[in-house]
């Protein structure tokens, strides 16, 4: 369906749903409307926003089978880490007073390949129950994140840390087992903090219970600008400004986060004024553009921020694939040549400015200059695709369909998650492959199936996915240690279980490279291997967008590299 056709259908749905939606936000959920002289400026400020579904994954850590995405979008509203980026890639301390540097002696790189970094914590930081944050909370986070007895979907950099010393409550001395180029930028929850006073004793005595604690979701206690004050299952949660937040009380008093899995309902609610905004994944780019255009046609000035935050990919299955020839690079190259990726971008992301992808390095990234001439490119070429299939020994029958060398018919499985953009993407790829004579079996996973790590890892052919544009999430998609297995409770981002000693060596070396010349060489070698061997198919850089009504200020989108769109939520305001 063309973009204009989708807009017509969406408009019709919006008109129907808007008739059922409240015309004004409830007094509980948003700030009351007020004129300049009404006196309402002194009233509490409340913001209502939509997220894609009710979180089932933890606000911190990677426990359980959840994807970690939904709660992660809210994480920095309720919690913080040692450091974080801003929307322009600037790195700043959060819970640390300053970042380690070699000049100040707080980052020591030794000749034997080990390192030491020293972080000093902000004084006076408290958990939402009033307990003080201490260095021991980071030690607990590190121990839990690297613990093989806990079902972590990812372990991040925690295994690279040999030990953490805490000479006092406000000092962390981290000993690194090997060099790591981002040791001054611990922006995730790889070492917590986890509250020792709330969950420490349970970790020591009952690890099975530890992983199932309601603390991680509905009873969460953090150290961010907002505290979780209530959670109504199947409906919404409420975040309340934390009066003792170390950087000052947030400007908005209450944020109501509504669980809304139906995109047309979110669109209608925004246009009807029932909610104030939506953060990434609640709506795709096309839907955000529709709402923005409708508001602008009405003379309003909404806040709409579009960012390339993910690497959109297809993951081939490398363990017992069907057909088995997926293991043959000629088939993988043929199928990529057969995909019209530019037409896909033009159809799905009209007006976004997002380019087709060849690697996980975005063209505006400084590293792109290092690698651009090392990239193997696969232009849309149906004839070349069919030539490669012939090289496999496959033959085309009289009906225009392909048969393997042994005479078996060929069907390519292609799975994706539910959603307008992902399903349209799947349809385009399926049509492209069908056009060269291949049968394609399309499967759309339900929301529940998409949260099941096992089902995400046992697809027979290809599975569509998106990797956040961060160092860890892109490189570890290609590393054998990230292969999900039953023994690992199906945790890990390398869903197709690609395994290559050469790729592992490149990723491992890059994770330890501090010298810029070494980084440049390793990135070139890694991208050369990735684009030549195709452990994953690069499609395009997927944008995510936040949109808020006119009058919401301070929203700046996600960080670069991405961590959470709520990274500066304490600065948001309502005018």
Image (cartoon, rainbow, N blue to C red):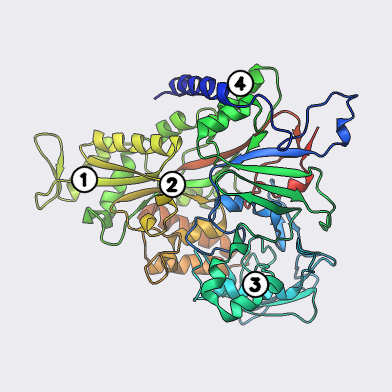
Q: Which residue bears the numbered disc 2? A: 447
Res 24 quadrant in image: top right
Residue 119 % position (x, y): 76, 71
Residue 199, numbered circle: 3
Res 204 quadrant in image: bottom right
In the structure shown, which secondary structural element does the residue marked by tag 2 occupy?
A: helix
Residue 411, numbered circle: 1
Q: Earlier in the sequence, mark 4 or mark 2?
A: 4
In the structure shown, which secondary structural element does the residue marked by tag 4 occupy?
A: helix
- How far separated are the C-alphas under marks 3 and 4? 48 Å
Q: Earlier in the sequence, mark 2 or mark 3?
A: 3
- Pick the quarter of the image with the N terminus: top left
Q: Which of label 4 and label 2 is nearer to you?
A: 2
Residue at left offset 55%, top offset 78%: 206
Q: Is residue 457 left or right of residue 142?
A: left
Q: Is residue 250 left or right of residue 531?
A: right
Asked if residue 319 is positioned above or below residue 370 in the image, the reply reads below
- Residue 558 or residue 131, whichever sits in front: 131
Residue 269 % position (x, y): 60, 29
Residue 196 % position (x, y): 69, 74
Q: Is residue 487 left or right of residue 80?
A: left
How many residues crowd around disc 1 within 10 Å: few (fewer than 14), some, or many (20 or more)?
some
Q: Earlier in the sequence, mark 1 or mark 3?
A: 3
Q: Earlier in the sequence, mark 1 or mark 4?
A: 4
- How far separated are the C-alphas under marks 1 and 3? 50 Å
Asked if residue 183 is positioned above or below residue 68 in the image, the reply reads below
Does the residue at mark 1 contact the one at mark 4 (Cβ under 8 Å)?
Answer: no
Q: Which of label 3 and label 4 is nearer to you?
A: 3
Q: Which residue bears the numbered disc 4? A: 294
């Amino acid at each position: 369906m063309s973009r204009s056709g989708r807009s017509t259908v969406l408009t019709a749905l919006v008109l129907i749903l808007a008739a059922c939606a409240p015309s004004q936000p409830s007094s509980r959920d948003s700030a009351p409307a007020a004129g300049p002289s009404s006196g309402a400026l002194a009233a509490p400020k409340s913001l209502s926003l939509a997220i894609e579904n009710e979180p089932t994954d933890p606000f911190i850590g990677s426990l359980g089978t959840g994807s970690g995405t939904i709660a992660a979008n809210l994480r920095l509203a309720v919690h913080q880490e040692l450091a974080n980026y801003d929307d322009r890639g600037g790195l700043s301390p959060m819970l640390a007073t300053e970042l380690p540097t070699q000049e100040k002696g707080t980052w020591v790189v030794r000749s034997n390949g080990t390192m030491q970094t020293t972080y000093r914590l902000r004084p006076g930081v408290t958990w939402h129950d009033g307990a003080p944050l201490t260095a021991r909370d980071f030690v607990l986070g590190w121990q839990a994140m690297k613990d093989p007895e806990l079902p972590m979907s990812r372990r991040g950099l925690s295994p690279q840390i040999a030990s953490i010393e805490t000479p006092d409550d406000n000092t962390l001395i981290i000993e690194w087992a090997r060099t790591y180029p981002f040791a001054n930028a611990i922006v995730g929850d790889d070492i917590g903090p986890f509250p020792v006073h709330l969950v420490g004793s349970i970790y020591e005595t009952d690890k099975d219970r530890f992983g199932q604690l309601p603390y991680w979701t509905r009873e969460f206690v953090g150290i961010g600008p907002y505290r979780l004050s209530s959670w109504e299952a199947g409906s919404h949660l409420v975040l309340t400004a934390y009066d003792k937040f170390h950087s000052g009380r947030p400007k908005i008093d209450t944020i109501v986060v509504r669980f809304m899995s139906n995109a047309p309902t979110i669109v209608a609610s925004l246009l009807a004024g029932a909610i104030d905004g939506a953060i990434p994944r609640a709506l795709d780019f096309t839907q955000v553009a529709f709402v923005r255009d409708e508001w602008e046609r009405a003379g309003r000035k909404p806040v709409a921020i579009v960012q390339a935050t993910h690497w959109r990919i297809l993951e081939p299955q490398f363990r017992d694939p069907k057909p088995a020839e997926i293991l043959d690079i000629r088939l993988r190259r043929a199928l990529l040549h057969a995909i019209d990726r530019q037409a896909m971008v033009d159809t799905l992301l009209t007006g976004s400015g997002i380019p087709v992808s060849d690697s996980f390095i975005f063209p505006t990234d400084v590293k792109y200059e290092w690698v651009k001439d090392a990239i193997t490119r696969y232009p849309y070429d149906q004839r070349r695709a069919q030539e490669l299939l012939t090289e496999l020994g496959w033959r085309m029958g009289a009906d225009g369909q392909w048969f393997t060398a042994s005479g078996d018919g060929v069907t390519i499985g292609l799975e994706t998650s539910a959603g307008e953009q992902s399903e349209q993407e799947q349809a385009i790829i399926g049509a492209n492959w069908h056009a060269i004579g291949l049968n394609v079996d399309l499967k759309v996973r339900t929301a529940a199936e998409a949260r099941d790590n096992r089902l995400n890892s046992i697809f027979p052919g290809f599975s569509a996915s998106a990797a956040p544009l961060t160092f860890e999430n892109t490189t570890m998609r290609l590393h054998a240690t990230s292969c999900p297995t039953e023994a690992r409770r199906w945790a890990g981002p390398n869903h197709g279980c690609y395994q290559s000693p050469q790729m592992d060596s490149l990723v491992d070396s890059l994770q330890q490279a501090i010298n810029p010349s070494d980084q440049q060489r390793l990135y070139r070698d890694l991208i050369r291997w990735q684009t030549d061997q195709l452990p994953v198919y690069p499609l395009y850089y997927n944008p995510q967008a936040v949109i808020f009504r006119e009058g919401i200020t301070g929203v700046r989108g996600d960080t670069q590299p991405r961590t959470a769109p709520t990274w500066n939520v304490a600065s948001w305001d309502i005018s």
